[in-house]
Image (cartoon, grey):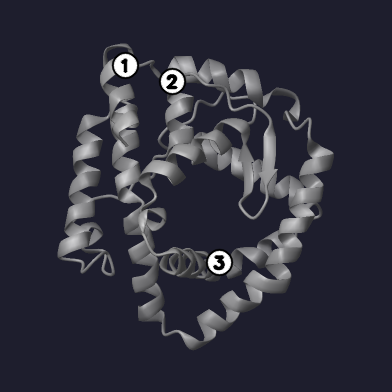
Amino acid sequence: MVLSLTMYAAGCTTLPNKDSHAEAEEQTQVNGHDPWEGLNRSMYRFNDNVDRVIIKPVAKGYRRITPRPVRHGVGNFFRNLLEPNTVVNDLLQGKPLQAISDASRFLLNSTLGIAGLFDVATKLGVERRQEDFGQTMAVWGVPSGPFVVLPFIGSSNVRDAFGLLPYYYFTDPRLQLDEREARILLIALDVIDFRSQLLGATRLLDMQLDPYLFSRESYRQKRLDLIYDGDPPLDEPSL
C-alpha cells in the first residue's frame, strides 16, 4: 500500500487522460488478440471441470442450507473488504473525490453496518464503485496484452494478471491474517458465496454454442466498461 501511495504522489501531476489509455486499448483489442487460444481453452476446460466437480456442488449446497439474509450478509462482508483496494486505486487514478466517497462508504459499512454485514452506505446514497490495479495500469497507458485464462481464477489478460500481484500482496485483507487456517477458511467462504451468486449465470453460459468465446468477450466488454467508468468510446475495436 505504501508503494501504491508513493506512485500516486510521484505521478499525480502527469496523470494521463482517457485518450492515452484508449490508444493502449486499441493496440491490444484488434484481431481478437488471443494468440494463446489453444492453451487458454485447455485451462478453461480445467477450470470448468474443477467448478462442476467441486465448487458448483458446494455452492448449491451452501445456497440450499443458508438463509437468504445470511447469504446477503456474507456477500456484503466480502464486498466491503474490497473497498480499501478501491480507495487506493482511486488515488492512483487521480480521483480524490471518488476516493473520499469510497473511503466513507467503507467506514459507514464497517461501523454502522457491523463489519460490513449490512450495506448501510448504499441506503444512504453512497454508490459502490469497483477500481483495481488492472484498471489503474490501463489509465496509465499500459496495454492489456493477450487474453489469458488463469488457473482457478478464470478470464484475464496479461495486464490484469499482473494487477493481481499488488492486490494480493498489499491490499487483500484476507491474506493479512496471521492464522493460516483463518486465511484458508475466509477465502473458501468467499469463493463459495461468490459462486452461489453466479448459479443463475451458469445456465446462460451452458446455452452458448462456444462458452469459451462467450466468456472471453464478456470479460473484455466488462473490463472496458470498468476502465471507462461506464462510458466506453464507441470506436473501440471490440465494440
| Mark nearer the viewer, 2 or 1 | 1
Q: Amino acid at mark 2?
A: Trp
Residue at the limit of the structure toward the bottom, as seen here: 65
- Whole-number angstrom distance, CA of label 2 to CA of label 3: 32 Å
- Whichever of callouts 1 and 3 sits on the residue coming sooner in the sequence is 1
Query: Image point 42% across, 39% down: which residue?
Result: 132
Q: Secondary structure at mark 3?
A: helix
Relative side of 48 to 162, left or right: right
Q: Amino acid at mark 1?
A: Gly
Residue on which the image places disc 2 = 140
Q: Quadrant of the C terminus?
A: top right
User: Which labelled disc corresponds to residue 125?
Assistant: none
Near mark 1 (Cα within 10 A), the count class, few <14, some 14-19 or many ≥20, is: some
Front residue of 101 and 168: 168
Query: Image point 73% across, 61% down: which residue?
Result: 48
Looking at the picture, how far across and down is residue 191, in whole percent?
52, 64
Q: Quadrant of residue 73?
A: bottom left
